[in-house]
Image: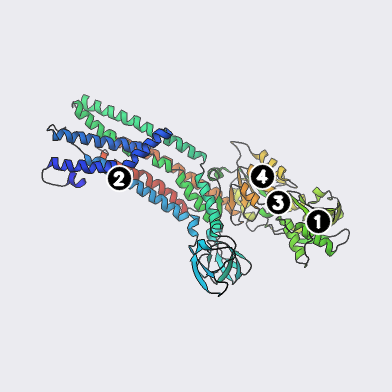
Amino acid sequence: MLVLAYAPLPEHKLLYGAISLVLATLVQFAVAGSFYLNAFKSLIYIGMVEMDMLVVLSTSAAYIYSVIAFAYQTAGHPLSIGEFFETSTLLVTLILVGKTVSAFAHHKAIESISMESLQAPTAMIVDPQSLKEHEIDARLLEYDDIFTIYPDTSVVTDGLIITGESEVDESMITGEADHVSKKSGMSVVAGSVNHSGTLSAKVTRLPYENTIRLVGSMVDEAKSSKPKIQEIADRVAGQFVPAILCITAAVFIIWVSIEKAIRHHNTGTACITAMTYAISSLIVSCPCAIGLAVPMVIAVAGGVGARRGLILKSSETIEIARNVSHVIFDKTGTLTQGKLSVVSGEFPKGGSDKLSSIILGTTANSKHPVSVAIANHLSALGLEPAQLEDVISIPGKGILARIEGAAIRAGNPYWLGVEGTNSVRKNLELGLSIFCVTIDRELVATFGLRDQLRPDALETVKDLERRSITVLLISGDNEAAVHAISTQLNIPSSRTRARCTPADKQQYVQELLQPGENVVLFCGDGTNDAVALAQADIGVHMNEGTDVAQSAADAILMRPSLQRILTLIDLSNAFYRRVVFNFVWSFLYNSFAVLLAAGAFPHARIAPRYAGLGEIVSVVPVVLVAMQLRWAKL
């Protein structure tokens, strides 16, 4: 089409016009047919006039005018401005090029941060009969298959190491740069990279349910959810096309008036000139940049967070995290490592292996850090757990069970009503966490436990306070233990709460929530934190905790590094800055481009045939700004 329009060919206007008509018709209906379908589907089924309608109107106007002009030329009555079939054809071409460029850039951005791209496609498994290795498609793995992990290869799926020692880079999943030493009995996660030695591992999770797939599904869920700022963008984009149609009509009317009143052209010439300006105005405007302003940044931000060990389950989380005013930490397993050690144990009625076995049976199946510490302590003595009946865990309080008709209660001393006994008071004075056991309401055992702060707890609290964020501490533990931790972290006693049940934690969060003023982030790990996690504006879950708490949270720390809370806040700020830039760019581009296309500047304009370049000019900066988030310092 361009050759026929611009090349210095011999004079055969009718022949070239006929060829151009055929080629332009093919492009208009065969190539651009999808624009017509999409435009009318949106109009009929959704009642919306979208970008495709602008393309349809502008290219159709250029094409129909050219057909009419060619007909007049064939009849021997050429119009003042002849046909320009190349305009509609070039418009379609440039718009498709623009859509292809933006789609490719979008695809590369998403692909580069896709967690599932870390999934190895094949696995080296060991035949149990011949002990020989052979390579299979990773999708064919089954539970308990033995697979080999060679140095400098990625782990194909979650597994349990059987033989070998090595160092593994888990930064793709956890965000931690340091390599983790691995040996027999330890777990490996899909997507991590083995380094120094060869490992043999047993499959514990199949590829469709492993850590990569879990993280990927959460990232996808966050990308598909819409924050409030996206609703604003949707409303703007929804009003954009009708506004452009009104502007186009105004441009046409103004130029007809100018051509007739000032330049004294006839009506036909005036309409033709006005139509070229109207077509340019229609096609140069682009709501695509507005439509991509938020979701493009969300898509990249979700992947950036995942690579740093922070999984966002909701896109609203990243929108509001920059406004966090209060951070509430649970104590055990959150600020502390949750790996308590038993430092004292007393048996007021006398100890015995049978009693210890009963206590071990009571705590053996509980995931609470205190119960785990007690169970590990007793198991190390070579004891076997007793078989109990009706074992029930009560979040925030303790455990109920029965044996041989006797009622066993184990948990915090206040729930058991034994806080006044000598053994309990002695442990309280030492600032220890206390675990008591009663049989038929008689105290039979008291354990004192001590926990260690997480290495980054103090630094995180200081960083939050430097940002003028109020830090609070809440726990179900006794006051002495909570006070000991708050003292180490320099958290005032007025901002600490002890002996809190799940309902107390929820109420505390509710007291701080003040719509329009406070944005509360709660960080916890256990089942007793689930209600508070759900109640807070942002619930952050430590991945070492329970699945119940994880399901209630808005964000998950894949590795228990409290610094990731700061990463969340920084990522939210980076997200907001880029969204604002995208909106400002979209506004400035469309304002200037429409004025330029409408002929508002005397010596500069965008001709109809080049207006399709607007798709590239408007969208590519939005995509590039979003992709730059991958290298932002967080």
- Outermost residue, front direction? 129
Tag nearer the camera, 4 or 2: 2
Q: Which residue is mark 3?
A: 486
Q: Are marks 1 and 4 in contact (CB under 8 Å)?
A: no
Residue 508, image x, y percentages: 69, 41
Q: Which residue is mark 2?
A: 94
Q: Is residue 15 above or below residue 368?
A: above
Query: Label 1, label 2: how many angstroms apart (C-alpha)?
Result: 77 Å
Q: Secondary structure at mark 2?
A: helix
Left or right: where 491 falls relative to 430 = left
- Mark 4 Cα within 10 Å, few/some/many (few <14, many 20+)? many
Q: Is residue 136 above or below residue 601?
A: below
Residue 538, image x, y percentages: 60, 45
Please report the residue visible at 41 percent of the width from the left and 49 percent of the height from the top: 106
- Mark 3 Cα within 10 Å, few/some/many (few <14, many 20+)? many
Tag nearer the camera, 1 or 4: 4
- Mark 1 Cα within 10 Å, few/some/many (few <14, many 20+)? many
Q: Which residue is mark 4?
A: 532
Identified by mark 1, the residue type is Asn
**Circle on res. 427:** 1
Q: Is residue 358 above or below residue 103?
A: below
The mark that comes first in sequence, 1 or 4, is 1
The mark that comes first in sequence, 2 or 3, is 2
Q: Is residue 631 visible?
A: no
